Each structure stands twice: as structure tokens, then as C-alpha cells.
Amino acid sequence: MNGAMMTICLMLLPALIVAENPCCSMPCQNTGVCMREGDGYSCDCTRTGYYGQNCDIPEFWTSIKVALKPSKKTTHHLLTNYKWLWNIVNRIPFLSNFIMRAVYKIRSATVDSPPVYHTGHDYTSWDTYADRSYYTRALPPVPPGCPTPMGTAGRKELPSPEYIAETFLARRRFIPDRRRTNVLFNFMAQHFTHQFFKTDFKKGAGRTWGDHGVDLSHIYGETVERQHQLRAFTDGKLKFQRVGGEVYPPSLADAPVHMIYPPYVPAEKRFAIGHEFFGLLPGLFVYSTVWLREHNRVCDVMKELHPDWDDERLFQTARLILTGETINIIINEYVQHLSGYNFDLFWDPELLFKDQFQYQNRIFVEFNHLYHWHPLMPDQFHVNGTTYGMKDYLFNSDLVFRHGFGATVDAMSRQIAGQIGPKNIGPVNLKVAVETIKHERNLRMQGLNQYRKRFGIPPYKTFLELTGGDAEMAAQLEEAYGDVDAVELYVGLMLEQPAPGSVTSETIIELGGPFSVKGLLSNPLCSPQWWRPSTFGGEAGFRLVKTATLRDLFCRNMDGPCGLVTFAVPEDVTPTGLPQEGEGGAAQDKQTSQNDADLVPVNGVLSSQDKRQPKEGDASQDTKTSQNDADLVPVNGVLSSQDKHQPKEGDASQDKQTSQNDADLVPVNGVLSSQDKHQPKEEDASQDGFQDAKTSNEVKPQPEETASEKPTAKNEEAPKNEVSPKNGASQKKDFQSGSPKNGSPSKNDVPKNGGPSKNDVPKNGSPSKNDVPKNGAPSKNDLPTAFPKNGAAPRTYVNRTSCKQCDRIEL
Amino acid sequence: MNGAMMTICLMLLPALIVAENPCCSMPCQNTGVCMREGDGYSCDCTRTGYYGQNCDIPEFWTSIKVALKPSKKTTHHLLTNYKWLWNIVNRIPFLSNFIMRAVYKIRSATVDSPPVYHTGHDYTSWDTYADRSYYTRALPPVPPGCPTPMGTAGRKELPSPEYIAETFLARRRFIPDRRRTNVLFNFMAQHFTHQFFKTDFKKGAGRTWGDHGVDLSHIYGETVERQHQLRAFTDGKLKFQRVGGEVYPPSLADAPVHMIYPPYVPAEKRFAIGHEFFGLLPGLFVYSTVWLREHNRVCDVMKELHPDWDDERLFQTARLILTGETINIIINEYVQHLSGYNFDLFWDPELLFKDQFQYQNRIFVEFNHLYHWHPLMPDQFHVNGTTYGMKDYLFNSDLVFRHGFGATVDAMSRQIAGQIGPKNIGPVNLKVAVETIKHERNLRMQGLNQYRKRFGIPPYKTFLELTGGDAEMAAQLEEAYGDVDAVELYVGLMLEQPAPGSVTSETIIELGGPFSVKGLLSNPLCSPQWWRPSTFGGEAGFRLVKTATLRDLFCRNMDGPCGLVTFAVPEDVTPTGLPQEGEGGAAQDKQTSQNDADLVPVNGVLSSQDKRQPKEGDASQDTKTSQNDADLVPVNGVLSSQDKHQPKEGDASQDKQTSQNDADLVPVNGVLSSQDKHQPKEEDASQDGFQDAKTSNEVKPQPEETASEKPTAKNEEAPKNEVSPKNGASQKKDFQSGSPKNGSPSKNDVPKNGGPSKNDVPKNGSPSKNDVPKNGAPSKNDLPTAFPKNGAAPRTYVNRTSCKQCDRIEL
């Protein structure tokens, strides 16, 4: 190399160095937009409230606001404590309206609407607004070609997703939720969110086939074609069939839509549901059933009031009413439970009518990722004294017919779900976690700390702070990432401990709250134009919307008396599903499955190669499950060969020993192949009408063979005289492919007179005081903290137009 | 019949009578929603500001507001008069901001957003919000099964659409617009609105294949597939070709997208444009060309500023800049001209940032119908001394090459368009009018008076009031409809006289204004989130958006000097296209066509059977056109046989005599059949390079044969030394299928330094004082009333952030 060349090289060197995008270090604060300009950058601080090179100097009014605003932590502490204070506030409409409105406004204002970024471009483009097949995003991606994957922070290579999943996420032993969140909640979350979390994996992790909001497409189908297949076209109703005298979703033969079922499921056990995925788990089937019944019930109410209406109008109006009911239940009960607030949340769209608010919504990819609450999912399901491993739960809608709809719901209300936090994802869902991490990298999503700043919470300074004091995990995390600013979003969210009093962590609350509030309140139903009686077919329909409760939803649509219907196991009820069940009826549960660590991906992308064979001698009892359910599975066979960061000896030896036995993989997004055939064991089949039917291969099941096998619950906690149906009929597997014309079950529910005041009184299962479960269920006057309102169905409305609560999922 | 049966019949009789829907009489006022309840009805008055059985009693604050609010007529009078006052107001930012903001707010508030009704249901449904394939509507339809088609008003049968078209709409003699609106405006209207008026006739008159707003899909294509075909994928640019040294849209061979061309158009004369329809008329081709050039020019500007940007980012950012430029020009100049206001309209999104405003938009079917401004379209086109009948204008993009781009634009600015009002729709467009009436009936649209009430203007009490004093037409109308409340929307809109000082009628202004303002200001560009420099690639791009003018758009993208570029013929320029042209250069125009009544449907649905053969001896001069162009055509052969109301003898004898000769039908929506072949006459072909090329059937035209045939304008009014290109090159038909790499014309336009202050200075055709046309064009200091601002390109911005004017099309 001669001198001239060397000079050229030296001249090029700085050029190569400065070729690094200065935006990689995320210099612009407070949502300022970084734009590269030659070797430098500029920040567009327009309307951020800040100025300066990096949008970091507050304008005058910003500094005042910042000084006065309490921290998110303080606000959360206030809301989750001082119960005496909130008891007063909740009774004073002026105050509670003020607070509720503030929650609506502050939460919504955090979300860009219209969206500024989407997953298709790194910058704002016309498609950001117009192409709804992309998820939007709250932060732009890390610029391409940065020194490290997270910009400039952290190591040049990220730890392998498999290592992360193994070390930080895998369940060692089932950790029950501290706030006694139950399985009925778990499936509400899964059922509700799958109407808008619909990743179109074929197109990419940033694409969606949904329509960005609470549209009840999971009940009515995403397309009008699917909707039409599901409709009876009589009196506005959806098609249904009768099984054991009760109404259930129609068979796939009656409503030919695309559903995901493995080949072994016989034709008559395949159901047509709004979402193709909802035949997967009985918990989803339960919700699909209850909403179908509610739709047809509401149609009857409307038909009585409007005899001149045609099928189409009855259908469309019932859909709007059910949409309203959904939002009301989600805010009043679901988010209320999630948040742990002592302030009674409520839904009143009118509180926003004088404010700036955009009645449009988009689903953010971050919202999807933060909602990966797989730790909630237990490894077993306890129904009426019988325990089902995941393998026997999957696609086993027969379980519902066997135990009866009411008993199944009661059981779901009694079983505790897993705690959202580290080391609590069951083995199969671990694959989803691995995929989620891969998707985030593919989307170049910014790290946890950047998102914390974006949503107004201080970034973590140390790994120890992030892990909530867990020194071992902090050390492992530091080894893996090098810099706390390099910790990825999803990983960080899963590693945080739940916030005090809440189901989820601080970051999930502060990110999820805005997306939730915005998503729920921006529904067109909430707009001043729509929020009026005529939208819902008159005052009666409007009242249905405003007074909906979870308990009413179930109890009005159930034969026989109504058991426990809650989102948390009441404190005076011993939960089922705890890792060590010595007391209560759980120990007596009949085992239907011997491999109990099976879990199911909520939003997964598992391939058929991932199938694992259960071990022969893995017949563990309930009390033994905690030893073998935290196993890890090689994901696509790459776990051992590609892992950059190997877990420490001590961890691995403990965690990996039983890694071959725990999961039946359930491909979710249409990738089910014939190899995935689920072969039930003999002993399962003998007591499972589902398998009987498969063997006999008949379209109509043999009701007499399986009916009344276990008509009453063995579990001591079950309110026998209420959960057990009074007539054996509902336990009978009596499939009747029904049309609304003959034997419509909701005929009885039609109010005799069109007067709106009578419409809401159900025939049975009324949410009156009489229906509070007799054994151990909380009485109205003595609700424990974790269970503030459930069980007492009709709220006493103080003096406001409507509703209660205000989040989609989180607050 | 025995007594019992008779009793039954008598009992049934009242039931049959009351079976009539009480909502047919539209009892609910002030947007109250009528709901049938048994034999009666109820009105939902929620948030109407009124109460009572019919929502007709004002609440206290409503009555105050109503008492204080000036009538729309008064406001219009104020805005279109008192020029001295407005001259002051326009100079005081505080005042003009106040007024502009009031216009934005009041206009937008009239439009339901989110929409309440759509064309798919008679009531609010989920699809109203979610199914964007429907147009929305401002009023629900007339209930089905009413006593009369319009509810309860009027006759049991409506007059035949053909009779209405014949009697009230057909042009007898070209009526020029009083406000000197020109052909450049006419084609701007057509070009601009076709990005969102995209009726999907295959699905129905209420369906759309557009995306409900100003999205520039007419430039970039509705789908990403079309967009990709149109893109060069180099430096963000669109594909183009060079003809005569100038840049034009690419040939269809280079960018294979679906375009509507008749079979006789040779391959090399088929152009690929964003909208499949825009090869139809040279006027549309001119706009397509100038926006293509502007896009590529802006890409060059951005590339210079951001050398690190890839093709995608350059493309996307240029698209956003062009969207902004479009909105700015539409508000500042287009709506300004339409409105006739002496108040200077302007575009400043920030004025709405503190208000309630929905950044979402829908296209209302009423907006589409009121925009059927076919009277604007003249029967002939005068370019540079040559007159083209419609037949020779259709699909004749060669006309632009022949005269040169600049001369064509100059000619369009000089030719006066038709007045929007009765008896001024050319023969071919009459079919569109007939179809529009049919569509309205199909959609059961409410009548003119109901819409007037909905938009805050008093309903007409008499037919005479509606026709503005035309007693004969009032009598005919009364005979046709029986009741002024039964007059249909579109018919009424077309029969009104233009409002004083404005281009359109009062109802068009009061209905169109809200839709326009809402559509323009609700663009995401206008949202607080988007309206900042970084969205547009920095300050330079932001400035391009905020300072765009029509004149700049053309002059910066033109070889050679720039002629007249205006939306109205300046008062000191003699317009071409007047019915009797004795003076000026028009009389010397060379005739290229002998049947001069040809017109083209703007939004039409013409079928191939409708083709009419021009008469042999129909060689009329310019001065004779007024005798034979008002002819009527049988529409689908039903005119004579089915017409319910036959026109009076006197009318018919006069109107029908030449009904066979006046129109070449141009099917617009893909229904072109081979029978529609356009056979040009010999003498046309001899002077038309377009036809030469057809005969020779070569891909490359013979440039020498046709070039420079008429290089300079014969019309005295044409500014010879400016319109005629200085170099013959631009007249040469030198087709070069170009990529941006070789010989890019915009290379010259790239500013030498990235400094934003230089970007806006065009190479030639700068909108500085030097460019005001030398002959007769208005000087900056002496603009006539009808021509307030054009010609003086860069506005002097007082002290506001941006912009000017505030409507989409109308105010």
C-alpha cells in the first residue's frame, strides 16, 4: 500500500464512520422525529411541547405541566389504595365523572390518531393512514444499519430467542395469579382480543386481516360472506343447533365456513363460529356459545318490539346491541378487575362529547405484543371434579356438553389462572414467545425503555430495577443484553413483576391502558352521532347495552340455575388449579389426562415439525404436575445448535430433564397438517363422548351412551343445587340442528309486552340476589378486595346516563 | 259473503290502512330519527337541540342560537359583496383566521362523522361504519312502501327521467358561465373529483371502489399493484415518456395497467395513468401530465436534500407533498373561484387544532350527485385557433402534442365553460342525467326540500321560487311533480339558478360546502400528528405544500414560457367558446369537426346501443352551433315509448328535430364494445397525427409528418411570444420512452444546494411578475372581480402558518 492509497483510506475512514445514521442513538426526545441530514440530524419537535436540538427543553407550559403532574406510579398507587376514599368518590357522580373523563382523555391522548407510523414504512406515508392491512405502531423502528440491533445500546448481537424463552419465560412450576384471576377471565381475554388481533402471518408479522377494533367479527365473521353463512335469515338470528336441549353454534355442515379443526374431529363435532380459530378450546367455545345465545335472545326482544322489522334489521340491530354489551362488560368488569383500581370504572361515552376525540381506531403492533398473556393459561382444566390435561382439552367441545354449560362456566370461574410475569409460560406457548421475539426483531421494534419513555414512565436504570429485585435474573439479563436500554419490549414486559394490586406489570398497564381506552371509546357506538336510543332499536335496546353484565350474559342464556360467573375466584372460594391442592375438592378430581403440562398457543405460528410425543410413563397426578411442566422444547430444532447464550449449568440441569413429554402442538393459523393428528389414549376415549363419536363416525352422536355420566359436580366447591341442572335434559347429548322457527329457546325470553322496562328481566338466572351462589360465594355486602363487584349483577346507577368503566383490556 | 266474513274484512280494513308507515311523511324534524312503533311513530331527538313529538320544539339554547344566527342567504350575501370590507379583513390575520376557522367549523359540523347512514341499509348498522364499499348518505332513504315515491308528497308516479332531462336539462343553446369559469377549471373539477367519486356500477349506484377522500389515487392508482406498475422505482419517480422533448405519462406498453381506450387507439397512443378513465379527454390528460411532472420534480428536490433516501421514501414523501399541494390549490384557487367570496379563503389546518374535529372522511352519495356539473362541459374545444368537436377531442391526447403542452393549457384558460343551471347539459351528458335520476330513485333518495332543511336552508314553498322566477319551467315542474316537496334532489339542484356571485346554486353551495370542507380538512395531512415538516421531508417539502399555486404547478413543469393559467377567463381577455363569436380570433378557428354538439359523460353509464351517427350535412361553423346542439337522444330506446309525461307540443317540435346527429357516445365504465368504434372522417385524419398513427399502425409515430403543423396560435388572444414555444422541439412528436436516468428533464430543476429557500424558485415559468401574460392578461394591481387572484402566483402571506381557502369544491 503506497502513501497515496493510505491517504485515501484514511480519508474514507471517517466517511465510513459517519455513514452511521445519527438517528441510531434515538437522540430526539418526547416523540420528536429524527431526520438524518447529511452527517448530522435534526429533530422535528412540532407540537411536542419541547424544543432544542433534541426536543428536550420543555416549553414554559410544558414545564409547568410536568411539575404538577403526578407520576404514573403515584396515580396507580392512589387508585389501588385508599379504599375508603374511593368508596366516597364512587358515590358522588360529579367526582367519579370527573375522574372517569380524565382517564378517558389522558389515556386516549397518548395514542396517535390518525396513526403516524405503521409496519410498512419507517416514516409517515400515505399508506400509514390508508392501508389498513398493516398494524400501526407507536414508535418508528430502529433505523436500519445501526451499530447494534437496538440502535446504539447493548451488544452487537442479541441473545437467541430460545435462550431468552428458556431462561426467563419458561414455567418451572405453575405460579397462580395473586389477584385470583380465573380461567373465565383468561378465555374472555382470548375470545375478546381475537376480534382485532388477527395477524396475517402469510403476509408478515406486521400485517393484519382484522379491522382494527371492537367489531364483533369474532362472532359474526370478518367478511359478509362468512356472516351470511352463519345467519339463519329468520328473525335476524344466527344459525344454531340444540345439544341436550341447549343452544350451541351450528355444525360446520349447516354453516360451511372455514374453521381450523384437526382431521380426527368428526363432522358433527365441528362447529361454525365467527372466528375460524374458536373451535380450538372449550373456553372459547363457551364464549362463542353464550354470545350466540345472547344474539338470538336480543333478536327476540327486538322482534317483539318491532314486529314490522325484517330479518336484516333485526340482525343488524342485535349486532350493535351486542357490541355495546361487550364494551360495557369489558370496561365495567374486565378492565376493572385487571386494573385493581378501587375507583369504579364505568362506560359513559357522553363524558367525551365536549372534548377532542377521534372516533377511529387502529390496532398497534405493540398492543398485540404486550397482550401476549400466555402465563395466564394453566396446564390443566378442572371441571366439575374432573381434571383435563391440555391434550384432552383441545378441540374438546364435548367437554361442555358432558358437564353441562352451566357447570363448565362455574368451573371456569373457580379455577385460578397463571400470573403474568417471568417464568410462567407453559411449554407450548414458549414457542409463541420465541416467535414473538423473532417478530419484534423482524419489525426492528425499539426497546422496553424507549417505550416506557414514549408512554410517560421513566426508563429503567438497572436490570435489578427491571426484574423487581431478582438479582439472579438481573445478572442473567445483563449478561444477555449488556445494557438495560437494549432489553426488548416483549421480553421486558414479561420479566416485570405485576404492579401492586394489578394483574399486569407497570409497563403493560401504561402501554396497554391507552390502546385499550382508545379502542373502546373510539368505537362509532360511542360517537355523539350513534349514541342514542334509535341506534339500538329504541330505549329497550339502549338499556340492554347500558346495563349489560357478565353475569347477566351467562345467566340469561342458561338452562337451569346459574352458578359462579366471575373474573376472579372469590376470596372465600378455594380455587382449583393451584399447584398444590391438598384441600377442597380438587384432590378428588378424576384424571382424564396424564400429561398435564400441555398448553396452547394463543396467537401462535407453530409448525407441524414441532410436535412432541408424550412420554409413556408420564402419568402424574394433580399434585405432581409442578415437576415436569416447565420443560423446554427445541423450537424448529434450532435450540441446541444455534443458541448463542447457553443457560448456566444449574438452571439447565433442572429445567431440561423432561423436555420431551409435555405438549401437543396446536397449529393455529391454518397450518395444521395431517401429521398433527391427535391420538387420544384409550382410557380417555372411554369416558369422552367426543372420541366415541369419532370412532363410530356418525353424524349424530349417541346421546344415551354418554349422557348423565357425571351429571352432578363432585367438587365440594360447586354449588350442587344450582350448577347441576334440575332436569337431566341439558346433560343429554341431543344434537338437534335447529332453526329459529321450531323450538326456539329464546321464545320464552321474549317479553310479553313491548314495554322497555320489562325487557331486561330474564326468565331464569336472573341477576337478582337470589342467584348469588349459596355456598361460599360472596354476598353482596361483603365483597373481598379482589372481587369488587361480580356476583351482584345489576349496578345501581347513580345519576349518569349510562355505563361504567373505561378500558379495553388494561388501564 | 256472510256477516262474519264481512266483519273480519271490516276489521282488516283499518289494519291495511294503518299498515302505511307513519315515517313516510318524514315527521321528525331537525335530524330526529323516525322509528315506527306499531301504528304510530316516535322521533329520537337526542342531541338535535330540539324536543317534542317531532323534534320541532327548540331547547332554550337552540332558540337563542337560531335567533342570533344569520340566514345562509345573508351570510352568502355578505361574503360575496362589500369588497372594500373584505379587503380590510383579508389583511388582518386575526380577523381572517377567525372567519376561516368559523367556516371550517360550521361547514364540517354539518356532516355526520362517523357517518350515520349509508346506501346499504335504511338505518344505522355496523356496516355503515365498517363497509367502505358503500357511499354514505346524509339522509336516510324514503321508507319503503310509502304512498308516493317521495314519501307522502307529490304524485303517485314520478315523471319519467327522460321527460325531465328533455324538458328541463337539455341544452338548447350553450349558456356560458356568468363568472367566466373556464375549461381549465372544468377539467380540474373532473380530474380532482374522480379520485373519490368512483361509483362501482357493477355493484350498484350506491357502491364505490374509491377510498373516500383526497388520496391522489387518480395519480398513483387505487391499488398498490397499479401504483407499482406506474412507478419507475428509481429515485421515487413515476414512469414517463418523452414526446417532443417533453415529459408525458408512459405508454401502456411500458406500464401495463387497465385503461379504458377504444380499440382504434394504437398502442403507442395509449397512456398509463392513475385513473383508468383519464385517457378519455385531453383535458384530463393535461392534468395527469402536469401532476406526473410535478411528482418527478418533487422527487428531484427531495433527492437533493436527502441523498440517503431510497426510492420508496422519495416516492412516498413526494406523494404526501403532492397531496398537500392539491389541497392548497383546491382551497386557495378552485373553491375561491367557485364561491365568489370576497373573503380570501385559505388552508391552515392549525386553525382546527383546538376544536372537535374528526380526521376521517366518507364520500356521501349526495355529494357525488350534486357534483354532476355536466353543464360546465362545452360542445367544442378551441385550441390555438383550431376548434375541435367532441368527437375529435375524445381520446385525442395527440391534440396536446400537436399544439404543445403550454399552448393547450393557455387555450383551456381562455375558453369559457357552461353555466351550471337548467337547460345547459349537452346531448350526450343528458344520458348521465337520466341515469342519475334513475339512481336516485333506486336509492330512494329524499327530495330537494328535505335536503335543504337538513342543511339549514328553508325549503322552497313554490315552484316559482325554485326556478328563480321562470314561470314556464315552474308550471312544467308543477305538472310533473305536483308538489314542490316532491322535486327530486338532483333535478332540483340542476334547475336552480346560480347564487348571486357564485358559480353554483344556493343548494349546491350549502350541501357541497360541508362535504368539501370536511373532505379537505379531515385529510390526515391536516391532523396535528401529521402537519409538521418531517411528514413532508423537512421544511423545504412543507413549504412546497404551503405555497403551491395552480400557476406554479403548470409553469414549473413546462418547457418554454408560460401562458395563461387560470380558473376563469380574465375579464380583459375575450373568451373563446361563446355561442356567438363575432369578434376576436375565434371566428378564424379551423374546423376539425362538423358535429359540434358532441359531449362526453363525466360519470356516465352509456351503453353501446346509444351511439348516434352524425348527420351528413351537419357542418356548422362556430357561430351556428347553437341551433342543433340541444337535441335529445332516445335513452336505451325507451324515450318515446315509456315517457309518462310527454313534453308539450311546442317544446317537442323544437327540441327533437335533430335528435339523430349530435353525439358520439363514450362509454366510461368499461362497457366499451367493439361497435363503438370511432370512425374519423377523412378530413380529420389528414390533419390529425393521432389518426395518422392509427392508419400506419406503427408504435412510433412519424414525427416529421405532423410536427410544427400549427406551431403558433392563430387566435389573436393568444400571447404569441409566450405560448408559442421558443424552440420547435416541443412541437415535435418525438416519443422517447424514458427512464428517469437518461435525460431526466427535472435534473435542471434540482436546486444546486439543499437550502430550502432556493427550492421553490423554478427554472422557468416562475410565478414572478414577469410571467403575467403580456397581452391582455390582468396585471397584478388590476384584477377584475371574477378573477381575483390568478396570474399572481405567490401569495403574500400575512402572518399565518400557511395556506389559503377552505373547501373541496364548493362552499
Image (cartoon, coloured by chain):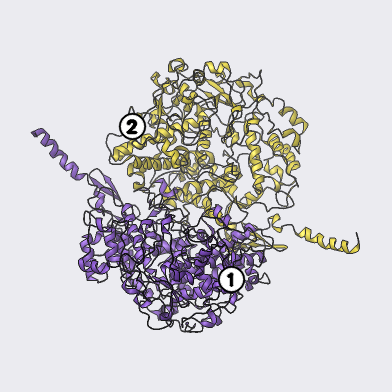
Chain colours: A yellow, B purple
Circle number at residue B41: none
Q: Chain of mark 1?
A: B
Residue situated in front as seen by the camera: A277 or A291: A277
Badge nearest the viewer, 2 or 1? 1
Q: Chain of mark 2?
A: A
Question: x, y percentage for residue B257?
Answer: 53, 55
Q: Residues within 10 Å of mark 2 (few under 14, many from 20)?
A: many
Helix, strand or loop at disc 1? loop
Q: Residues within 10 Å of mark 1 (few under 14, many from 20)?
A: many
Q: Is residue B653 left or right of residue A187?
A: left
Disc 2: which residue: A749
Quarter of image, res A560: top left
Above/below status of B444 relative to A243: below
Of the residues shown, which amino acid type is indicated by label 2?
Answer: Asp
Of the residues shown, which amino acid type is indicated by label 1?
Answer: Gly
Circle number at residue B244: 1
The answer to whether residue B318 is visible is: yes
